[in-house]
Structures are given as C-alpha cells and as structure tokens.
Amino acid sequence: MAFFKRLGFYLIGLSIGIVFLTIFLKNKSEERGVEFCYFPNCRTLQDIRSKPMNYSDDVKALLNNQQLDSTKMAHFLHEGDVDFKNSDTESKPCKTYIIKAGIGEKTGIMTVKNCTDSVLIEKVEL
C-alpha cells in the first residue's frame, strides 16, 4: 500500500512540474522569439537568417522582374531543407549550401554562400 501512495505522490509532482515547465517555455519563446534549434537543418537556416544578406546579379534580376519576392525568399529560409549531401560545408571562409523548398507544385533551389560576416544568395531556381 505504501508503494502506491508514493507512486501517486510522484505522479502528481511530475504532472505539476511538466505543466509549469510547459507554461514557462511557451511564454519564454513567445516573448523573446526564441527558437529551439537542435537539428543541423534548423541551425544552418537560423545562422543564415541572422546575417546581412547580399544578392548576386542573377538574383537581383529576378527580384527586379518580380519573378522572386520577399515572401518566397523567407519561405526558403524558414521552411527550406538544406541538402547537405550536395552542399560544400568544408570550404573556407565561405560555406556553400543548397536549400530546397516547395513553392506551389514546384521545388525551388537556392544556392547560398554563408560567410562569417554576411550571406550571399548566388542563385535561385524556381
């Protein structure tokens, strides 16, 4: 009988702790915009988003012709999948990443050079 009583107290304490932890982490992430990135894809995209962006002449032409807009760029950098197999992650000083994202029925491909201070978006294929 004592075992079940201790088990009950343990489960009550555990459930109260989980509720407090959930509320605390939810409020902390909403207030400060904190994003918990543990996987390589999320960490890479977060690193790219945190730096100032420069555009190649090809990308500037797409932006000027209105074939590419800021919502599509944001979609690549928030919802895209980094293709680590085809990316050059070992080069110095800038690493080259291939980011794939579904835009409509098509899959778009973005080539990004991630340097230490800035990001260069080299090519976007829609």
Image (cartoon, rainbow, N blue to C red):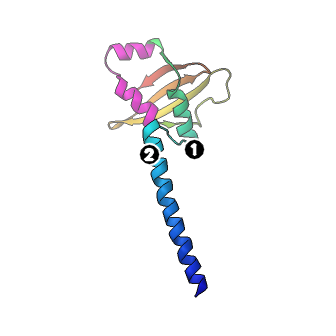
Q: Can residue 108 be spotted in the picture? A: no
Q: Dot 2 surroundings within 10 Å: few (below 14), some, or many (20 or more)?
A: few
Label 2 is placed on what type of residue?
Asn
Counting residues from the start of the chain, the first of labels 1 and 2 encountered is: 2
| Residues drawn in magenta | 58-79
The residue positioned 48% from the left and 49% from the top of the image is 24
The residue lying toward the viewer, choosing from 123 and 6, is: 6
Local secondary structure at mark 2: helix
Q: Is residue 77 magenta?
A: yes
Label 1 is placed on what type of residue?
Tyr
Residue sitting farthest toward the bottom:
1
The residue lying toward the viewer, choosing from 99 and 8, is: 8
Q: How many marks?
A: 2
The residue positioned 58% from the left and 36% from the top of the image is 84
Dominant secondary structure (helix, strand or loop) of the stretch shown in magenta:
helix
Residue 108 in percent (x, y) is at 41, 31
Q: Is residue 27 left or right of residue 11?
A: left
Query: Is 10 placed above or below 81 here?
Result: below
Residue at the disc numbered 2: 27
Residue 72 in percent (x, y) is at 37, 28
The residue lying toward the viewer, choosing from 59 and 74, is: 74
Kindly check if marks 1 and 2 are in contact, taking CB atoms under 8 A apart as contact: no
Q: Dot 1 surroundings within 10 Å: few (below 14), some, or many (20 or more)?
A: few
The residue positioned 49% from the left and 63% from the top of the image is 16
The numbered disc on residue 38 is: 1
Residue 103 in percent (x, y) is at 36, 34
In which quadrant of the rendered image does the C terminus lie?
Answer: top left
Q: Can residue 21 be spotted in the picture? A: yes
